[in-house]
Image: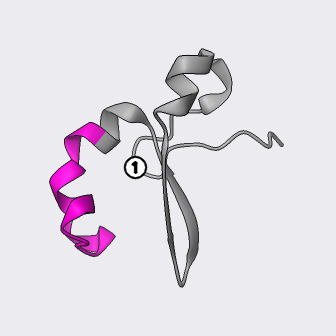
Amino acid sequence: MSDEPTCSICGRSRAGATAVEALAWVTDTDERGTRWLCPTCARTHVRDIEGKLPAEYW
């Protein structure tokens, strides 16, 4: 089992990312724990994230 985070939406692993790409990953922490989003999914859902909408609405 890998210690590298995976995107909670698309399942992409951060393992193959370059150093610059790895910095673009986003974390979201709530009562259920920490969720990771890859740069592509974070860009797609940036308004939902900034609006603090529950992940169920994304």
Q: Does the magenta stretch include residue 11?
A: no
Residue 31 x, y percent position in the rendering: 53, 85
Q: In which quarter of the image is residue 4?
A: top right
Horizontal side of 2 relative to 48 (left or right) equals right
Horizontal side of 51 relative to 7 (left or right) equals left
Residue 16 x, y percent position in the rendering: 63, 18
Q: Does the magenta stretch include residue 50?
A: yes
- Label 1 crowding class (10 Å Cα cut-off): few <14, some 14-19, many 20+? some
Which quadrant would the N terminus be assigned to in this image?
Answer: top right
Q: Main secondary structure of the magenta part?
A: helix
Q: Give the range drawn in magenta.
A: 43-57
> Which residue is identified by label 1?
9
Residue 26 x, y percent position in the rendering: 46, 47
Kind of residue at badge 1? Ile
Residue 39's place in the image compared with 21, above or below, is below
Query: Visible in this render: residue 31?
Result: yes
Residue at the right extreme, as displayed: 1
Indicate how the structure is coloured in the image. Answer: one colour
Badge 1 element:
loop
Horizontal side of 55 relative to 34 (left or right) equals left
Q: Which residue is located at x 41 percent, y 41 percent?
A: 10
Horizontal side of 39 relative to 43 (left or right) equals right
Q: Which residue is located at x 57 percent, y 28 percent?
A: 22
Q: Which residue is located at x 68 percent, y 26 percent?
A: 15
